[in-house]
Amino acid sequence: MIKQILGRLPRKPSKSSENREFGGSSAPPLSNSSNSRSSDIVGNHRLLIDSAPLAGPNSTSSLGFSHGSKLAQAVDKKLSRNSMTAPYEALPGFKDVPSSEKQNLFIGKLNLCCVVFDFTDPMKNAKEKDIKRQTLLELVDYVSSANGKFAETVMQEAVKMVSINLFRSLSPQPRENKVLQAFDLEEEEPLMDPAWPHLQIVYEFLLRFVASPETDAKLAKKYIDHSFVLKLLDLFDSEDPREREYLKTILHRIYGKFMVHRPFIRKAINNIFFHFIFETEKHNGIAELLEVLGSIINGFALPLKEEHKLFLIRALIPLHKPKCLPMYHQQLSYCITQFVEKDCKLADTVIRGLLKYWPITNSSKEVMFLTELEEILEASQPAEFQRCMVPLFHQVSRCLSSSHFQVAERALYLWNNDHIENLIRQNRRVILPIIFPSLEKNGHNHWNQVVQSLTLNVRKIFSDIDPELFEECLNKFHEDEEKVEEIKKKHEATWKRLEEIAASRSTNGEAVLVPYTVASQTS
């Protein structure tokens, strides 16, 4: 009877379960992957607490509070009650505690924000979500107004909270057809993350924490390490443009503050580009990564390191290959122009790289290439221009004679740039013979009036600066046209002869075999 009564009484939780909930020594460290984080299902929400013990001074408890403090005991009690009965209650405000307790309260609030809620149902845990949101806002204000160096314990807990909230598996929408619809992507509604009301504040917290002068980079690099940076870079593939915008700013801040991570960050971005170019051609954050790189390249010291030149050749130039180039071309063009402005000798390499990936059937992409080409030529010097002008103007000539009026028009606009026009004038004896046939045909035969008008203007420029050369090119053009006409007449005569032979031998209705000698004589 007594045993039955005792069996109905609630049992006290074991020490091992307390260790698992509050950070026993058996928990995985923060540097482990997100899959190894301990997760407890409490009530209707998921409690994700990475239970690594703290190494800060006077931190005998896992939350970093001194047991002699009334506030610490109250917070410990509240969190213990949370883990057992699942209420989610706000901690006191920073203005309600003495200065000596603010750091402990800060750590307590960080741990409180390690709870991750499900946002697929807006009404689920509405009260708890609001408490967490207010707590996050308090953390942002605390970091922004801090007037003393953050302790290592605080850094560890801050990075832990950020990692738990941000580092998650992205669930992208099906993108099999997106590459084929690159030009329509800009008109699509971007996918918004339902958890953004909390994510935004966590990102703001991380941004303020990294940018704060109270964050010592030498200590923080132990927690904002290579693993953290890689997981941050993985988030650039998020569908939500608001998240990518925050990531862009934060990555730039990390690159500026943690000099020890700079080579690793560049290499990691390089690997993302390789994966995108040569394997998937699918990534949402290429434009944002290039925007960060544009600022990084702008700060490169001269002379440029060989590592940076290889990055240009192996990663940036091949980024012209994917079909979804319109999504990031503006940022890519800026990065490449920065390289040429820093070292004009790279102009030849860049232009030949553009020619290698020049589109054949995609007219819109061709217009973008011509726009970028103008920016590169504007930063080029005569010596580099002369090295690549022959293959370059063979391509320009093909663009001039394009039946797509925007391609022809954009190519003719090159002469509106004074620097490029001067380079062409100085090398007109090489360039004019290459492009003259296209100019002459456009002037007489192109269907678009604007293209015809622009072509006549360019012809006039050449005829004014060097009438003799212009006349030579005109005479050669007429000679070539006459030769083409003669060949055309010979072909017509050959076919007519073949038709006559076929007609004379086809009276019996059998197939006609034409002797090889007849074809060779008439050709």
Image (cartoon, rainbow, N blue to C red):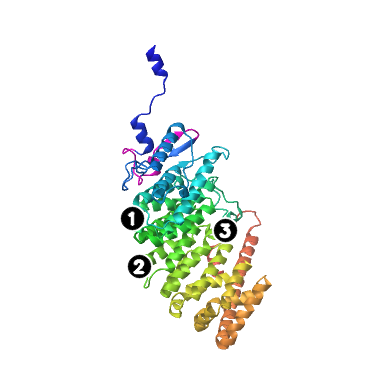
Mark 2 neighbour density, 10 Å: few (under 14) some (14–19) many (20 or more): few
Q: Which residue is mark 1?
A: 219
The image shows residue 222, relative to residue 468, as above or below, that is: above
Lateral position of residue 188 relative to residue 204, left or right = right
Residue type marked 1: Leu
Q: Which residue is mark 3?
A: 513
Residue type marked 2: Glu
Comparing marks 2 and 1, which lies closer to the viewer? Answer: 1
**Sequence order check, earlier mark of 1 and 3:** 1
- For the residues labelled 2 and 1, say whether their Cβ atoms are less than 8 Å apart: no
Q: CA distance from mark 2 to mark 1?
A: 31 Å
Numbered range of the magenta stretch:
24-44
Q: Residue at x 52, y 78 (%)?
A: 420
Judge whether residue 125 is colored magenta.
Answer: no
**Sequence order check, earlier mark of 2 and 3:** 2
Residue type marked 3: Leu
Q: Residue at x 53, y 53 (%)?
A: 242
Q: Quadrant of the N terminus?
A: top left
Of residue 65 and residue 485, the one placed in the foreground of this image is 65
- For the residues labelled 1 and 3, say whether their Cβ atoms are less than 8 Å apart: no
Q: CA distance from mark 2 to mark 3?
A: 65 Å
Of residue 327 and residue 33, the one placed in the foreground of this image is 33
- Numbered badge on residue 306: 2
